[in-house]
Image: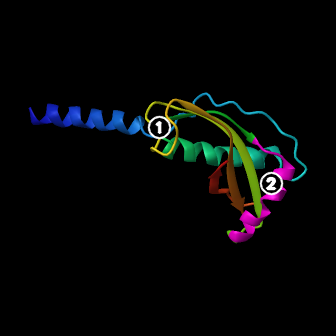
Amino acid sequence: MKKIVCAMLCILLVFSLSACGGNVNEVNTHNVESEIYSEEDIAAAIDTIKKEFKSNWNGCTLTEIYYAGDDSSKDHQDWADRNNADEAIVLLSSFDVDSSGGDGSLNPNSTYNDWKWILVRTNGGQWQHVDHGY
């Protein structure tokens, strides 16, 4: 009997862990030309945010994410300076929030558009998410 209960608890734990985080399964993206970043640079930044979203944005579904453009990244260079980095990149996204309101700070049953994600890096290293919002 103990083995059955333990097995059932393990199964429940696996299912509950897989339900955590945001949904990034069907996110759309599109190419935005850049004279600063390669397609690989932009894809790496997008992947960083997808991981962040999947890990920490419970009750939310990322529907679109893309590079905001060179001008936007130049306008946010101060974020790199503040974080002892030499590059900043800005992504824009859209996402839906379910009835839970995400972590409670978002409007339930709503869609957020033009949500900014600011990332920085040094010497072409890995992108680090440093801020987000409108």
Describe residue 71's horizontal placement relative to residue 14 as left or right.
right
Quarter of image, res 126? bottom right
Q: Is residue 122 visible in this depiction of the protein? A: no
Residue depicted at x 69% and y 54%: 118
Q: Quadrant of residue 7?
A: top left
Tell me, for residue 101, which label it has, or none.
1
**Residue 73 circle label:** 2
Q: Position of residue 91 (x, y in %)?
A: 72, 46
> Is residue 78 part of the magenta span, yes or no?
yes
Amino acid found under the numbered disc labelled 2: Ser
Determine the residue positioned at 81% across, 51% down: 72
Q: Is residue 47 above or below residue 122?
A: above
Please give the label number shown on residue 7.
none
Callout 1: 10 Å neighbours few (<14), some, many (20+)?
Answer: some
- Three-letter amino acid code at the position of disc 1: Gly
> Where does residue 57 sit, x and y in percent of width and height?
51, 42
Residue situated furthest left in the rendering? 1
Region in magenta: 67-82
Q: Is residue 43 left or right of residue 71?
A: left
**Quarter of the image holding residue 5?**
top left
Give the SS element for disc 2.
helix
Among numbered discs 1 and 2, the one appearing first in the sequence? 2
The residue mark sitting in front, 1 or 2, is: 1
